[in-house]
Image: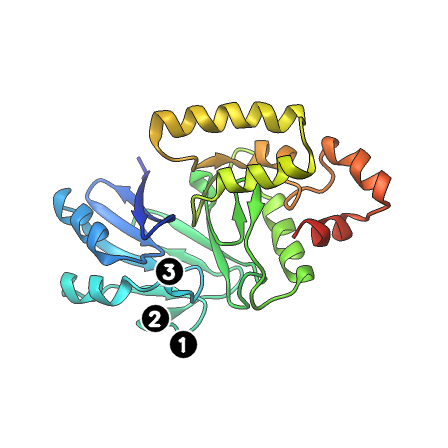
Amino acid sequence: MISVAHIPQLVDNYSYAIIKNKDIVIVDPADSIPILKYINKNQLSLKAILLTHHHKDHTAGVEDILNKIKSKIPVYSPNKEIKNTTIKVKDKDLINLNFIQVEVISTPGHTRDHVIFYCKDQNILFSGDTLFRLGCGRIFEGTNQEMFTSLQKIYKLKDSTIVYCGHEYTNSNLNFLMSIFPQNENLLTEKEKINLQLKETGFSIPFNLGIEKHLNPFLSPNSDYLKDFKDKNNLSNFELFSYLR
């Protein structure tokens, strides 16, 4: 049985631990200290590190983890220039770890090298800084078209997929959408659910992709509640995405 644990990082980052029995895989370590504490406390054996992109708030913890673990751990990333990368991955690659298979999906936009990790058999997606709950990543190196296309790749995944993203941005994303679509019933209902989830767990992550397809205008500009806005402003799907982004 696979489980996923949040390991809060820095101010609003998340690293994730994929665990089965005593084996663990770490996704996007920014700060080694809480990760090493988690591994040692639970007497886990680190099998691999997965990196979605080169930004330091997703990679800065790698070197210290490797130094402290003192064993040969593969580090998978989309860019050989990311320090400590041992295996470069690309779109459609399959990473076969000893307890889980991970598909690599290229999602340029936030950065040119960005990838996400999809565990199809487990219905789990690690979306890094491409997709957030009710939002998407800033476009630093890519283009609007690249990010739009990348999000459409995610849209095509199964509705039952559970998404783990790289930051706790949900409330700020929600506030932004409600400033454009005030008193929208879909968003007001979601706000109640988010507040309850935060109260119960401290996290608004993970979230269900099928629900997100109805709520997130960056992911699905065809959502019902966007129709009047698009028609009023005579916007195509891509133009709506670009306007909001």
Identity of the residue drawn at 55% across and 42% down? 173
Find disc 3 in the rendering and name its residue.
57
For disc 3, the neighbor class at 10 Å (few under 14, some 14 to 19, many from 20) is many
Identity of the residue drawn at 43% across and 43% down? 168
Alpha carbon separation for disc pair 2 and 3: 16 Å
Is 66 situated left or right of 205 in this image? left
Is 118 situated left or right of 147 in this image? left
For mark 2, give the secondary structure: loop
From what the image shows, is residue 225 above or below residue 145? above
Q: Mark 3 belongs to which amino acid?
A: Asp
Front residue (pair 119, 155): 155
From what the image shows, is residue 37 above or below residue 70? above
From what the image shows, is residue 140 above or below residue 242? below
Q: Mark 2 belongs to which amino acid?
A: Thr
Alpha carbon separation for disc pair 2 and 1: 8 Å
Q: Residue 85 — which label?
A: 2
For mark 1, give the secondary structure: loop
| Numbered label tally | 3
Q: Horizontal and vertical percent for residue 102? A: 42, 52
Q: Which is in the foreground here, disc 1 or disc 3?
A: 3
Find disc 1 in the rendering and name its residue.
81
Compare marks 1 and 3 and give the one earlier in the sequence.
3
For disc 2, the neighbor class at 10 Å (few under 14, some 14 to 19, many from 20) is many
Q: Horizontal and vertical percent for residue 199? A: 37, 26
Identity of the residue drawn at 71% across and 54% down? 242
